[in-house]
Image: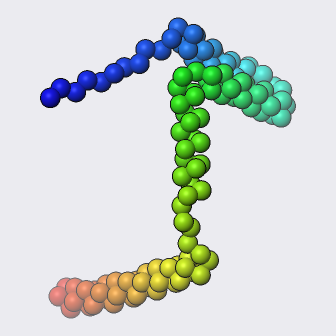
Amino acid sequence: MTTSTEQSKSSPVDVFKWLVVIAIIAAAVVGNAYFDDQPLLYRVVGVVVAGILAALLASFTDKGRAFIALLQDARAEVRRVVWPTKQETAQTTGVVVLVVAIMALLLWLLDLALGKIISSIIG
């Protein structure tokens, strides 16, 4: 039995798009450092606009479309989850708090007993 892994070749257009995305991100980083004497608001707006442009361009690549499909599938999956009711959440939280308190008490008693034993040995 042989297993083969298929590596999908990116088209030259996709490679070019990714290079432009990297250039946009690099320009945002360099521009932010170059214009450090400008108000922070202008630099933040520039970086956000550059990030939006880079994300928009990346979404038009094969991997970008696959990522968007993954996000849509994840959103659909989250909607299908049966979330606990408020009462179930409160009850579970109460049980967890109770168990933690009991374990803390037991560990404190164990520490106290071991401390007494060690102090009696040491003298």
Q: Residue at x 59, y 56 (%)?
A: 79
Residue placed most toward the observer, 98 or 42: 98
> What residue lies at 62% left-to-right and 19% top-to-bottom?
21
Quarter of the figure that contains the N terminus: top left
Evaluate whether residue 111 shows in this view: yes
Residue 90: give x, y in percent of width and height: 57, 80
**Quadrant of the image occupied by residue 111:** bottom left
Q: Which quadrant is home to the C terminus?
A: bottom left
On screen, residue 23 above or below 52:
above
Give the left or right position of residue 93, taking residue 36 as reference. left
Where residue 35 sits in the image (x, y, percent)? 78, 22
Q: How many marks?
A: 0
Specify the color scheme: rainbow
Q: Quick check: 82 left or right of 41?
A: left
Q: Position of residue 100 (x, y in %)?
A: 43, 81
Q: Is residue 94 above or below residue 58?
A: below
